[in-house]
């Protein structure tokens, strides 16, 4: 009985006749097939026999049933692979027209038709009250105006660093700038009649000393401090004959970064061995040798009032120190890659940081927390800078391996 019923069911489910029937006929055959397999528990079928029969019949339709099952959610890794391959990218909607040439451009980027972009990574930004200076692996320094909406090119200093420039800094009053090239040369600039002009006598005097890596200028532009490649920190008094007034030995540890407080009382340096030193500029003494970062330090920055020092680097953590006691008062965590640059807002309320993975974060010092993260690029961010405050709006600029400068209008985005 069981064998005859199985054979009749198999005959009903032959592929070609089933597909050639009309929809109503197909439905009736399906109902017959279901009836053929509906039996009571009192049936004389053995479990083994029924199992073999069911498997044999369903083998033809099981694949189509599986295909109808919803697939699991696409993983983040799969989405990233598609994005890296140029697929499934979101439309760019933050577009407008350049007021200079009328071409379409990104809302907060320089117009590529009006300004020739840096052909290589932009390593450093320096800000004055009305301008921003960018330095890259190319030989020219670019000066952009920050007083106009489209940040037009105000000046191009061509051929000043033959093999590129890795650091550029300005004094707080905007009267002087200093740039250091990969060739070891240091250039001193003065702002006169709306243009930057090289002070060749100062550049020649500084250039005779050991090569500077990271420079810093005092608020009034009278003093230049720099870390040297042989593990020293030197300070020059620029007016007059550019006299060297300080030479601090840091026991051979290469100084990767340096900063001067706004009031000129303190100087801090970060080193490749994780050391952080704070010096008093009036006496030349070192009151604190700070610990907390065991990996290379790539950025140090004093708060506007000089009460806090922020330091960060390969440890992926921003450490805040009290400059009066030398104590570590806070750790700001959230970056997942090396932190390359730090900068305080004009009020000291926010701290800006840029990292090697393209993330830019804005930190609230009162809350000790990140209040905004920007990740428009996946390439390294080499420099971040706050722009002069206009009304109630406080914006910032970032630059890096994507060879462009991005401008944000507010502390928390835009």
Image (tube, grey):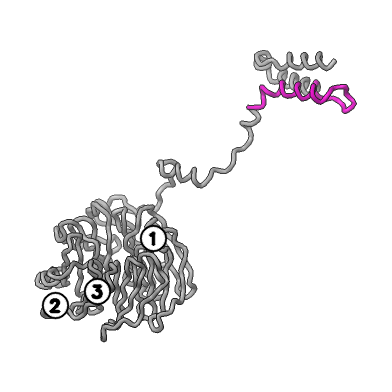
Q: Is residue 403 above or below residue 72?
A: below
Disc 2 to disc 3, how far (Cα)? 16 Å
Q: Which residue is mark 1?
A: 338
**Marks 2 and 1, the one that precedes in the sequence:** 2
Q: Is residue 386 above or below residue 95?
A: below
Secondary structure type for disc 1: loop
Which quarter of the figure has residue 188? Answer: bottom left
Which numbered tag is attached to residue 233?
Answer: 3
Q: Residue at x 21, y 79 (%)?
A: 246
The part of the chain drawn in magenta is 36-63
Q: Is residue 40 magenta?
A: yes
Q: Position of residue 386 (x, y in %)?
A: 34, 68
Residue nearer the viewer, 110 or 237: 237
User: For the residue carrying disc 3, how many other residues have a C-alpha within 10 Å: few (<14), some (14-19), or many (20+)?
Assistant: many
Q: Position of residue 334 (x, y in %)?
A: 47, 63
Q: Quadrant of the N terminus?
A: top right
Which numbered tag is attached to residue 242?
Answer: 2
Secondary structure type for disc 3: strand
For the residues carrying marks 2 and 3, which lies nearer the camera in this image? 3
**Marks 2 and 3, the one that precedes in the sequence:** 3
Which quarter of the figure has residue 170? Answer: bottom left
Q: Residue at x 61, y 31 (%)?
A: 67
Say if mark 2 contacts mark 1, CB within 8 Å.
Answer: no
Residue nearer the viewer, 313 or 271: 271
Say if mark 2 contacts mark 3, CB within 8 Å.
Answer: no
Disc 1 to disc 3, how far (Cα)? 24 Å
Give the side of residue 180 with respect to residue 34, left or right: left
Disc 2 to disc 1, how far (Cα)? 36 Å
Residue most toward the right? 42
Q: Position of residue 19 (x, y in %)?
A: 65, 17
């Amino acid at each position: 009985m069981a064998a005859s019923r199985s054979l009749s069911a198999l005959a009903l489910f032959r592929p070609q006749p089933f597909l050639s029937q009309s929809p109503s006929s197909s439905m009736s055959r399906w109902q017959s097939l279901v009836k053929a397999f509906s039996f009571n528990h009192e049936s004389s079928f053995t479990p083994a026999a029924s199992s073999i029969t069911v498997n044999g019949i369903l083998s033809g339709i099981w694949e189509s049933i599986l295909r109808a099952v919803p697939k699991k959610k696409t993983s983040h890794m799969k989405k990233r692979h598609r994005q890296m391959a140029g697929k499934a990218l979101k439309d760019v909607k933050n577009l407008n027209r350049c007021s200079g040439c009328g071409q379409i451009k990104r809302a907060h980027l320089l117009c590529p038709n009006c300004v020739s972009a840096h052909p290589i990574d932009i390593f450093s930004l320096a800000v004055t009250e009305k301008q921003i200076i960018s330095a890259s692996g190319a030989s020219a320094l670019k000066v952009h105006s920050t007083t106009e909406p489209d940040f037009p090119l105000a000046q191009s200093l061509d051929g000043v660093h033959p093999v590129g420039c890795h650091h550029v800094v300005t004094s707080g009053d905007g009267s002087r700038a200093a740039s250091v090239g990969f060739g070891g040369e240091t250039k001193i600039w003065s702002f006169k009649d709306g243009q930057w002009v090289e002070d060749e006598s100062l550049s020649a005097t500084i250039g005779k000393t050991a090569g500077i890596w990271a420079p810093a200028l005092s608020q009034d532009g009278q003093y230049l401090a720099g870390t040297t490649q042989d593990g020293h920190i030197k300070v020059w008094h620029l007016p007059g004959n550019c006299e060297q007034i300080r030479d601090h030995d840091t026991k051979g540890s290469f100084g990767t970064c340096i900063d001067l407080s706004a009031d000129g009382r303190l100087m801090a340096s970060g080193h490749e061995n994780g050391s952080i030193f704070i010096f008093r500029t009036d006496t030349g003494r070192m009151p604190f040798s700070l610990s907390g970062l065991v990996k290379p330090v790539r950025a140090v920055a004093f708060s506007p009032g000089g009460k806090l020092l922020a330091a960060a680097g390969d440890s992926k953590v921003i450490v805040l120190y009290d400059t009066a006691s030398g104590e570590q008062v806070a750790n700001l965590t959230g970056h997942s890659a090396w932190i390359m640059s730090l900068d305080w807002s004009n009020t000291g309320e926010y701290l800006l940081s840029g990292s090697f993975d393209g993330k830019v974060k804005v930190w609230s010092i009162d809350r000790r927390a990140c209040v905004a993260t920007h990740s428009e690029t996946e390439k390294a961010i080499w420099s971040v800078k706050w722009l002069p405050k206009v009304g109630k709006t406080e914006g910032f600029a970032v630059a890096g391996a994507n060879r462009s400068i991005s401008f944000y209008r507010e502390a928390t985005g835009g």
